Image (tube, rainbow, N blue to C red):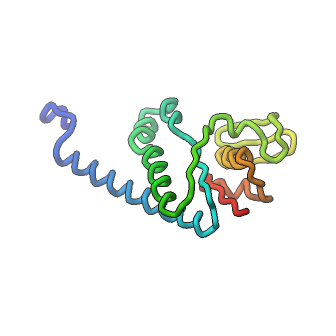
Amino acid sequence: MLKEANNEHTSKQLRILYRRRRRRFRDHVNSLVSDFVRRCWREGASEIVCGDLREVRKSANFSKKSNSMVHNFWSNGHMLRRIKEKAEEYGIRVTTVEERGTSSQCPRCGSKHIVRKGRLFRCLDCGLEAHRDAVGCVNIGLAQGEPIPAGVINRAVTRPTLLYVA
């Protein structure tokens, strides 16, 4: 409508609205990160391992609306920066690891004989069924040398984060 009305793609009012949306979004991210790092500190964590998601945006090829949502709201860089800053305040190290291929092996039996359909991961050897992001999260923990407590895989589904206390 702006293009038709005044031959421009934006206006002062639209910039103000986008700025307000960005501030609200970042405020929510900051409170989420603060709560997460505080919880890690209370649990005695000395290191936070984060998946490196920078390449995910490049391969986003969904519908027009989905692509715009991914590119306009994807804030992995901001979130990772805030985690590092907040963790430094608590004396916790932050390490990023490549996530590619983390859900291509069963964390329970180590088999690569799996089926991935949508967000579902299913091992054909041991029968494990879980969310692919949760499996990737558990496999990243295994690669860091952490033991996997029983039943933790399906608990990581809603928020693919794992807290390990040795």
Residue at image coords 52%, 33%: 55
**Please, which residue is most extreme toward the bottom here?**
42
Residue 124 location, x and y as percent? 84, 39
Residue 80 against residue 46 in the figure, above or below: above
The residue nearer to you, when weighing 122 against 65, is 122
The residue nearer to you, when weighing 63 against 55, is 55
The residue nearer to you, when weighing 85 against 18, is 85
Q: Quadrant of residue 45?
A: bottom right
Residue at image coords 80%, 41%: 123
Q: Is residue 149 visible?
A: yes
**Please, which residue is most extreme toward the left here?**
6
Residue 147 against residue 111 in the figure, above or below: below
> In what quadrant of the picture does the N terminus appear?
top left
Q: Quadrant of residue 151?
A: bottom right
> In what quadrant of the picture does the C terminus appear?
bottom right
The residue nearer to you, when weighing 132 against 50, is 50
Q: Is residue 61 visible?
A: no
Count numbered badges in the picture. 0
Residue 93 location, x and y as percent? 57, 54
Residue 88 location, x and y as percent? 49, 58
**Please, which residue is most extreme toward the front here?**
91
Residue at image coords 22%, 46%: 14
Residue 18 against residue 114 in the figure, above or below: below
Residue 122 location, x and y as percent? 77, 42
